[in-house]
């Protein structure tokens, strides 16, 4: 039986059993995703991880691993707590080992992630991210175990782990070096990064040497949701103003989202919520870059080792950046709806 038919049969069985089925999107094999997040100061990462779990609940994706590109903080624990909230405490986690990785727990805004450890004791293993397994080992183990050309990597932070993965050597998981392993197993890399048409952006600027190497040497198509796409896409007010209790997703948004009365024309946050850069990358990773987006083919290149990027338009390139197709207001509503979905199996109960 072809894999598609296997999934269709499983879906029919689930329907017969009264399970909630994917809504809004046709049945397809779940997209296999490795999520790579910074979870260090900004919190659209938590909204994105919530969307990914909601899509997994609906059978649209399978979360293979969730790793952190930042070190020496509570990033991995924050991810673990969210994974546990959605009933998936066993998802492999990992953390960068590179010296160039952005690190520390004193970054502005990291306190809301550390607060999760106090509120949800027993829901995480790695209070300090540096105690977690090496992200490269997690990547290699997971990639080696998957069918060729099947994995979508979705990065929401610095490009540190992608560089480290490319530079990895053959090991017990696979005799292939990192670049060959990626070329064999990865379908595409969807990244929230870079500034159009050129400039500096937080994710590609934070570990600039890694960004230059990763964007230059990556052997599969790269889909970029850049600063300009997400800047005026808003989500998160809905869950903050909901009556949801005991949600780490709501906790994090509640901690930092600007109150309605302080919103003005120039504030980062608006009445609909916080810029949804990372959530847009998850939508592109799972539902495809042409689901709600127009695409322009080409690629981003780092011009130096100081984080200066430039967009190279190239209609022949397999890589692209996303642009607005569906109005951003509507995409924001889709993100809010996903963030508001109650986990199918909260805390694994
Ligand atoms: Ca991020």
Image (tube, rainbow, N blue to C red):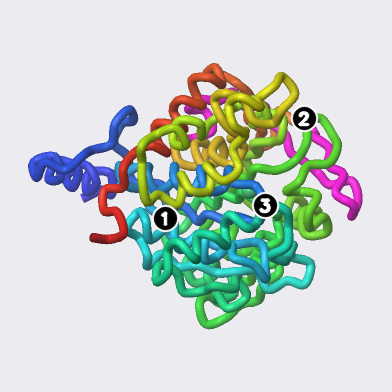
- Give the residue drawn at x 80%, y 49%: 205
Question: Which is in the foreground here, disc 1 or disc 3?
Answer: 3
Query: Could you tell me residue 119's position as x and y percent?
Result: 45, 61
Check residue 29 for magenta coloring.
no
- Give the residue drawn at x 46%, y 74%: 125
- Tell me, yes or no, if residue 145 can be seen here: no
Q: Which residue is mark 2?
A: 313
- Tell me, yes or no, if residue 284 can be seen here: yes
Looking at the picture, does residue 226 appear above or below residue 56?
above
Looking at the picture, does residue 42 appear above or below residue 296?
below
Query: Could you tell me residue 215's position as x and y percent?
Result: 74, 50
State the image quarter where residue 281 is shown.
top right
State the image quarter where residue 19 is shown.
top left
* Tag 1–tag 3 contact (CB < 8 Å): no
Q: Name the N-terminal-most of marks 1 and 2.
A: 1
Q: Which residue is mark 3?
A: 109
Q: Give the alpha-carbon distance from disc 1 to disc 2, as whole Å.
A: 32 Å
């Amino acid at each position: 039986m072809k894999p598609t038919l296997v999934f269709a049969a499983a879906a029919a069985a689930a329907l017969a059993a009264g399970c909630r089925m994917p809504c809004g999107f046709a049945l397809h094999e779940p997209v296999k995703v490795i999520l790579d997040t910074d979870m260090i100061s900004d919190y659209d990462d938590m909204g994105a991880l919530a969307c990914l779990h909601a899509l997994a609940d609906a059978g649209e994706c399978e979360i293979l691993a969730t790793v952190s590109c930042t070190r020496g903080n509570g990033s991995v624990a924050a991810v673990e707590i969210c994974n546990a909230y959605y009933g998936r405490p066993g998802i492999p986690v990992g953390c960068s080992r590179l010296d160039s990785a952005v690190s520390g727990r004193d970054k502005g805004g990291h306190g809301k992630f550390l607060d999760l450890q106090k509120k949800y004791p027993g829901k995480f293993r790695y209070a300090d991210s540096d105690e977690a397994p090496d992200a490269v080992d997690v990547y290699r183990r997971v990639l080696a175990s998957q069918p060729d050309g099947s994995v979508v990597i979705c990065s929401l932070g610095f490009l540190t782990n992608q560089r480290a993965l490319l530079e990895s050597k053959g090991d017990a998981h696979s005799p292939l070096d990192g670049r060959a392993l990626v070329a064999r197993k990865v379908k595409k890399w969807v990244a929230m990064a870079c500034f159009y048409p050129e400039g500096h952006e937080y994710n590609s600027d934070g570990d600039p040497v890694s960004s230059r190497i990763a964007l230059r040497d990556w052997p599969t198509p790269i889909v970029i949701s850049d600063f300009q796409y997400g800047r005026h896409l808003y989500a998160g007010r809905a869950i903050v103003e909901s009556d949801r209790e005991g949600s780490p997703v709501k906790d994090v948004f509640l901690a930092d989202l600007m109150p309605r009365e302080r919103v003005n024309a120039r504030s980062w946050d608006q009445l609909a919520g916080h810029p949804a850069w990372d959530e847009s990358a998850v939508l592109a990773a799972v539902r495809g870059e042409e689901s709600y987006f127009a695409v322009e083919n080409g690629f981003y290149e780092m011009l130096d080792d100081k984080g200066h990027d430039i967009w190279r338009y190239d209609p022949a390139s397999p890589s692209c950046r996303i642009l607005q197709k569906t109005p951003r207001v509507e995409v924001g509503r889709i993100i809010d709806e996903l963030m508001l979905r109650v986990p199918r199996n909260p805390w694994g109960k």
